Protein backbone atom coordinates (compact mmCIF):
# COMPACT_ATOMS: atom_id res chain seq x y z
CA UNK A 1 0.00 0.00 0.00
CA UNK A 2 1.24 3.47 -0.82
CA UNK A 3 2.10 6.05 1.82
CA UNK A 4 -0.95 8.19 1.02
CA UNK A 5 -3.31 5.24 1.47
CA UNK A 6 -1.72 4.44 4.81
CA UNK A 7 -2.17 8.06 5.91
CA UNK A 8 -5.86 7.95 4.99
CA UNK A 9 -6.39 4.69 6.88
CA UNK A 10 -4.55 6.00 9.93
CA UNK A 11 -6.61 9.19 9.90
CA UNK A 12 -9.91 7.31 9.66
CA UNK A 13 -8.78 4.99 12.47
CA UNK A 14 -7.85 7.89 14.75
CA UNK A 15 -11.06 9.79 13.97
CA UNK A 16 -13.15 6.68 14.69
CA UNK A 17 -11.32 6.23 17.99
CA UNK A 18 -12.59 9.67 19.00
CA UNK A 19 -16.04 8.11 18.85
CA UNK A 20 -17.71 10.25 16.20
CA UNK A 21 -19.01 9.13 12.83
CA UNK A 22 -16.39 9.74 10.14
CA UNK A 23 -17.23 11.33 6.79
CA UNK A 24 -15.01 12.39 3.89
CA UNK A 25 -15.19 16.01 5.00
CA UNK A 26 -13.71 15.00 8.39
CA UNK A 27 -10.81 13.24 6.69
CA UNK A 28 -10.26 16.22 4.37
CA UNK A 29 -10.22 18.59 7.33
CA UNK A 30 -7.88 16.40 9.39
CA UNK A 31 -5.37 16.04 6.55
CA UNK A 32 -5.92 19.51 5.09
CA UNK A 33 -6.68 17.96 1.68
CA UNK A 34 -9.30 18.91 -0.86
CA UNK A 35 -12.62 17.09 -0.78
CA UNK A 36 -12.19 15.75 -4.34
CA UNK A 37 -8.80 14.25 -3.41
CA UNK A 38 -10.29 12.57 -0.36
CA UNK A 39 -13.30 11.35 -2.33
CA UNK A 40 -11.02 9.70 -4.89
CA UNK A 41 -8.91 8.10 -2.16
CA UNK A 42 -12.02 6.80 -0.37
CA UNK A 43 -13.09 5.14 -3.62
CA UNK A 44 -9.72 3.41 -3.91
CA UNK A 45 -9.80 2.25 -0.28
CA UNK A 46 -13.34 0.99 -0.74
CA UNK A 47 -12.35 -0.95 -3.87
CA UNK A 48 -9.51 -2.56 -1.91
CA UNK A 49 -11.99 -3.53 0.85
CA UNK A 50 -10.31 -1.41 3.54
CA UNK A 51 -13.38 0.75 4.15
CA UNK A 52 -17.13 0.72 3.71
CA UNK A 53 -19.17 3.82 2.95
CA UNK A 54 -22.79 3.92 4.11
CA UNK A 55 -25.62 5.64 2.24
CA UNK A 56 -25.29 8.64 4.58
CA UNK A 57 -21.58 8.91 3.72
CA UNK A 58 -20.32 7.48 6.99
CA UNK A 59 -16.97 5.76 6.55
CA UNK A 60 -16.09 2.69 8.58
CA UNK A 61 -13.02 0.52 8.47
CA UNK A 62 -13.48 -3.12 7.52
CA UNK A 63 -11.80 -5.75 9.69
CA UNK A 64 -8.89 -5.75 7.24
CA UNK A 65 -8.77 -1.95 7.16
CA UNK A 66 -8.86 -1.66 10.93
CA UNK A 67 -6.02 -4.18 11.32
CA UNK A 68 -3.91 -2.39 8.71
CA UNK A 69 -4.59 1.01 10.31
CA UNK A 70 -3.80 -0.31 13.81
CA UNK A 71 -0.53 -1.77 12.54
CA UNK A 72 0.38 1.62 11.06
CA UNK A 73 -0.46 3.46 14.30
CA UNK A 74 1.42 0.90 16.40
CA UNK A 75 4.47 1.22 14.17
CA UNK A 76 4.41 5.02 14.39
CA UNK A 77 4.12 4.90 18.18
CA UNK A 78 6.97 2.39 18.48
CA UNK A 79 9.21 4.43 16.21
CA UNK A 80 8.38 7.60 18.10
CA UNK A 81 9.28 5.95 21.39
CA UNK A 82 12.45 4.50 19.87
CA UNK A 83 13.60 7.93 18.64
CA UNK A 84 12.92 9.52 21.99
CA UNK A 85 14.74 6.70 23.77
CA UNK A 86 17.81 6.45 21.55
CA UNK A 87 18.20 9.87 19.98
CA UNK A 88 16.96 11.86 22.99
CA UNK A 89 14.83 14.11 20.80
CA UNK A 90 11.73 16.00 21.94
CA UNK A 91 8.37 14.32 21.39
CA UNK A 92 7.41 16.74 18.59
CA UNK A 93 10.50 15.78 16.60
CA UNK A 94 10.01 12.09 17.30
CA UNK A 95 6.39 12.27 16.10
CA UNK A 96 7.39 14.01 12.86
CA UNK A 97 10.20 11.57 12.15
CA UNK A 98 8.12 8.50 13.03
CA UNK A 99 5.30 9.68 10.77
CA UNK A 100 7.71 9.89 7.86
CA UNK A 101 9.52 6.62 8.54
CA UNK A 102 6.55 4.39 9.41
CA UNK A 103 5.95 3.92 5.69
CA UNK A 104 9.49 2.80 4.86
CA UNK A 105 10.66 0.67 7.78
CA UNK A 106 10.43 -2.96 6.80
CA UNK A 107 8.75 -5.47 9.10
CA UNK A 108 12.03 -7.17 10.02
CA UNK A 109 13.55 -3.86 11.11
CA UNK A 110 10.39 -2.92 12.99
CA UNK A 111 10.42 -6.25 14.86
CA UNK A 112 14.09 -5.68 15.75
CA UNK A 113 13.32 -2.21 17.12
CA UNK A 114 10.43 -3.59 19.18
CA UNK A 115 12.64 -6.39 20.49
CA UNK A 116 15.35 -3.90 21.44
CA UNK A 117 12.89 -1.69 23.31
CA UNK A 118 11.39 -4.71 25.09
CA UNK A 119 14.89 -5.72 26.26
CA UNK A 120 15.60 -2.19 27.49
CA UNK A 121 12.28 -2.13 29.35
CA UNK A 122 13.04 -5.50 30.99
CA UNK A 123 16.54 -4.36 31.97
CA UNK A 124 15.18 -1.17 33.56
CA UNK A 125 12.68 -3.09 35.72
Image: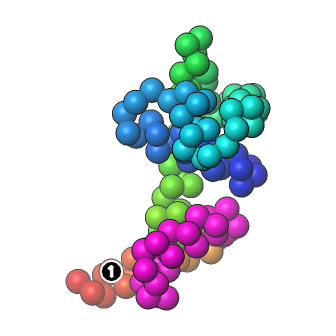
Tell me the chief SS of the magenta region.
Answer: helix
The colour scheme used here is rainbow
In-front residue for pair 26/2: 26
Residue shown at 37% from the left, 85% from the top: 120
Residue 109 lies in quadrant: bottom right
Residue placed furthest toward the left: 125
**Circle 1 sits in a helix, a strand or a loop, which is it?**
helix
Magenta span of residues = 80-107
How far from the left and from the top, in percent, is residue 124? 27, 87
Residue 77 part of the magenta-drawn span: no
Residue 105 part of the magenta-drawn span: yes
How far from the left and from the top, in percent, is residue 2? 75, 52
Please determine whether, in this image, residue 51 is positioned above or below residue 31.
Answer: above
Please determine whether, in this image, residue 5 is positioned above or below residue 125.
Answer: above
Residue 110 lies in quadrant: bottom right
Residue shown at 33% from the left, 80% from the top: 121
How far from the left and from the top, in percent, is residue 38? 69, 35
Tag 1 residue: 121
- The quadrant in which the C terminus is found is bottom left
Residue shown at 30% from the left, 88% from the top: 123
Please determine whether, in this image, residue 61 is positioned above or below residue 70.
Answer: above
Left or right of residue 1, residue 24 in this image: left
Residue shown at 64% from the left, 34% from the top: 50
Please determine whether, in this image, residue 29 is positioned above or below residue 2.
Answer: above
Label 1 crowd (10 A; few <14 / some 14-19 / many >=20) = few
Left or right of residue 90, residue 2 in this image: right
How many numbered dots are placed on residues in this image? 1
Please indicate, yes or no, whether residue 48 appears anywhere in the rendered image.
no
In-front residue for pair 81/18: 18
Amino acid sequence: MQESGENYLKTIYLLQDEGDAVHSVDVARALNFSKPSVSRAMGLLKNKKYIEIAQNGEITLTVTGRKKAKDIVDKQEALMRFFMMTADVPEEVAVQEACKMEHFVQDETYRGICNFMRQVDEYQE
